[in-house]
Image: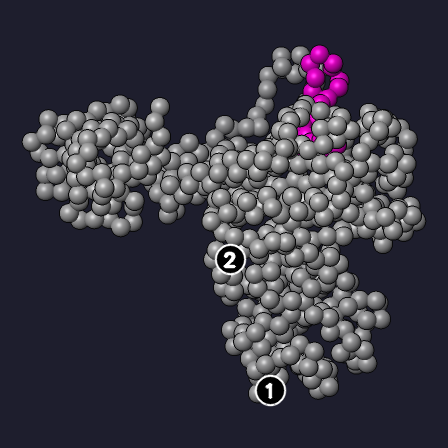
């Protein structure tokens, strides 16, 4: 089988055979023009009135499958919007292979069909050029990934899809066992335990393009089943792993986009990222950093701010340059509603022009207004947006607001990529739902050497050897150095308040493996779907997954999840509570 051919003006005079779908048919003055679409794109064919295929050509409908043969000739009216726009096929033979029903939406890149309709007829939606190109990019990424790792002597190993449920993180998808009634497998949230066991086994350098599953709430960049580039190495430290990770990304960018990524990537501590950008995945394509202006109000008479400070809270602000005149009171009220979705109590603002106006201009002193101007380096027509309250709420809400403003104001240049490592993550985070500290990453993450003693008694100030690679405000991947010492692992489990029974039932086999000469090791996982989404310039992960689920985790095309009959349930020993 030959490679696909892409025809252009240099192929004039050649006899060709083209298979594909009818994208459009036009009868102009007796000439029938057919736009034929296949994986190589669109090419125009022309059937003349004296052609024996003329009646067939006139009867064609959209999405009919046809085969044409003929001679490539130069077009009189050229189309610069398609690669084959300088040529057309003068048809001498046309074969109708299959007809099509009327299609439920127009197959074009600028279709206005609702997403639910396109997902129901995904097999038609995938005929669109823009989606086809997304999957060509995805294929290039996976090819570049395998080449990169094979060149470094990594071994690709496939780990199980049916595994043990270890619910320390997102919810597991459970699979009932017919043979062992009442018992369940889980679909892997990641190959985490298996890849660490491969290090115990002496593989030293492992990678896999792995399918993963998490039963969690969905959003535009998340799916219940997803694919990750999974990597693990023995006898390495943080710098070793990050070096491999960033060289992988640089290789992919070069192979797929022709973009040179400057290495090494910058590193930013987690605390600094939260302080300046309100996010552990900061978008650095624009400025608008978060500034602490609490000191401006240390002697304030403004009751709201005084109470915040007395309660140990903070007052932070972002400056929207040259935007004072762009935001009316109504638009600022919308921004207030936006930050309230992140639990902020409200949004104060000041407009610096010939005179200072704004929601708090009359309740704060001139000295406080001038102090803000000095700290934030305010210029005429600048808009200052202020949130006060508990530190975590203030930072996160302002972080979300700066990203929204950047999109609304067009501050992000198309095709711009900003990459960094966020390092030194906390080992734990407080869970309101469970009323305890849980793992920030996972329970196998090695704490900083200086923080091992804090695992039990100072969880809030315990940091780990963990790192995330961030691209344009998205967590593209992340990992950590793992715990290889069984005593440290045991202490970590105790810090997470897992009982001996819990440890034995969930991780007994893994803890046992640590007793048989476990090497120091670490690794990372890169989200293939998310990385593809970023390189395709999309903001919706469903655009790069062939058959995705909706936001409610349903497949509209296959109509699943669906009910099963009683016989299947009986075979599994299950009964549904209705």
Please report the residue visible at 52 percent of the width from the left and 65 percent of the height from the top: 411
For mark 2, what is the residue?
416
**Left or right position of 139 against 297:** left
- Foreground pick, 542 / 191: 191
For the C terminus, the quadrant is: top right
| Residue 385 drawn above or below residue 430 | below
- Foreground pick, 41 / 7: 7
Element marked by disc 1: loop
Q: In terms of sequence position, does the residue under pointer 1 or pointer 2 come before the other?
A: 1
| Residue 80 drawn above or below residue 125 | below
| Residue 335 drawn above or below residue 526 | below
Proximity of marks 1 and 2: CB atoms separated by less than 8 Å: no
Mark 2: few, some, or many residues within 10 Å (few <14, many ≥20)?
A: few
Where is residue 99, by image quadrant?
Answer: top left
The percent position of residue 200, horizontal first and vertical second, equals 78, 29
For the N terminus, the quadrant is: top left
The percent position of residue 187, horizontal first and vertical second, equals 67, 28
Please report the residue visible at 67 percent of the width from the left and 61 percent of the height from the top: 277
CA gap between label 1 and label 2 equals: 37 Å
Numbered range of the magenta stretch: 172-197
460 in magenta: no
Q: Which colour assignment does the render follow?
A: one colour
- Foreground pick, 479 / 288: 479
The percent position of residue 312, horizontal first and vertical second, equals 83, 67
Can residue 512 be seen in this snapshot? yes
Looking at the rendered image, the disc whose residue lies closer to the viewer, 1 or 2, is 2
**Left or right position of 335 against 165:** left
**Left or right position of 160 against 408:** right
Can residue 214 be seen in this snapshot? no
The percent position of residue 80, horizontal first and vertical second, equals 26, 50
For mark 1, what is the residue?
355
């Amino acid at each position: 089988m030959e490679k696909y051919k892409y025809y252009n003006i240099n192929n004039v005079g050649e006899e060709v055979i083209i298979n594909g779908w009818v994208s459009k048919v036009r009868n102009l003055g007796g000439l029938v023009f057919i736009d034929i679409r296949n994986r190589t794109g669109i090419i125009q064919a022309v059937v003349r009135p004296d052609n024996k295929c003329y009646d067939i050509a006139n009867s064609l409908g959209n999405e009919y499958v046809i085969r044409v043969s003929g001679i490539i000739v130069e077009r009189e009216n050229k189309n610069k919007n398609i690669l084959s726009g300088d040529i057309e096929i003068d048809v001498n033979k046309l074969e109708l292979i299959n007809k099509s029903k009327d299609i439920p939406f127009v197959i074009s890149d600028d279709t206005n069909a609702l997403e639910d309709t396109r997902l129901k007829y995904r097999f038609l939606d995938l005929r669109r050029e823009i989606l086809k190109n997304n999957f060509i990019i995805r294929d290039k990424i996976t090819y570049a990934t395998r080449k990169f790792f094979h060149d470094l002597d990594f071994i690709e190993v496939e780990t199980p899809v049916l595994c043990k449920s270890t619910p320390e993180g997102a919810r597991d998808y459970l699979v009932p066992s017919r043979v062992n009634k009442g018992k369940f497998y889980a679909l892997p949230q990641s190959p985490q335990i298996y890849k660490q066991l491969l290090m115990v086994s002496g593989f030293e350098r492992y990678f896999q393009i792995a399918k993963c599953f998490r039963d969690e709430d969905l959003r535009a960049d998340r799916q219940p089943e997803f694919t990750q580039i999974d990597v693990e190495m023995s006898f390495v430290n943080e710098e070793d792993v990050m070096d491999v990770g960033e060289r992988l990304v640089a290789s992919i960018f070069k192979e797929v986009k022709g973009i040179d990524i400057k290495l090494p990537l910058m590193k930013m501590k987690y605390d600094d990222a939260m302080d300046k950008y309100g996010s552990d995945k900061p978008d650095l394509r624009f400025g608008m950093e978060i500034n602490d202006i609490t000191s401006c109000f240390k002697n304030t008479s403004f009751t709201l701010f005084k109470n915040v400070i007395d309660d140990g809270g903070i007052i932070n602000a972002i400056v929207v340059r040259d935007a004072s005149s762009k935001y009316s009171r109504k638009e600022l009220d919308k921004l207030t509603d936006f930050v309230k979705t992140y639990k902020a109590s409200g949004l104060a603002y000041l407009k610096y022009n010939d005179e200072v106006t704004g929601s708090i201009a009359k309740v704060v002193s001139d000295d406080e207004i001038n102090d803000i101007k000095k700290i934030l380096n305010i210029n005429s027509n600048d808009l200052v947006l202020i949130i006060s309250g508990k530190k975590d709420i203030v930072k996160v809400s302002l972080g979300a607001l700066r990203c929204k403003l950047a999109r609304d104001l067009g501050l992000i240049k198309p095709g711009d990529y900003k990459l960094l490592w966020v390092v030194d993550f906390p080992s734990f985070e407080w869970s309101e739902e469970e009323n305890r500290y849980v793992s920030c990453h996972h329970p196998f993450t090695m704490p900083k050497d200086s923080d091992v003693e804090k695992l039990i008694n100072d969880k809030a100030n315990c940091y780990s050897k963990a790192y995330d690679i961030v691209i344009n405000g998205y967590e593209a991947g992340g990992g950590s150095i793992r715990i290889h010492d069984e005593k440290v692992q045991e202490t970590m489990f105790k810090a997470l308040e897992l009982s001996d029974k819990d440890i034995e039932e969930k991780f007994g086999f893994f803890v046992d493996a640590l007793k048989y000469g476990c090497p120091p090791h670490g690794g990372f996982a890169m989200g293939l779907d998310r990385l593809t989404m970023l390189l395709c310039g999309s903001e919706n992960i469903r655009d790069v997954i062939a058959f995705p689920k909706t936001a409610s985790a349903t497949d509209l095309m296959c109509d699943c999840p669906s009910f099963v009959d009683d016989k299947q349930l009986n075979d599994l020993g299950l009964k549904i509570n209705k």
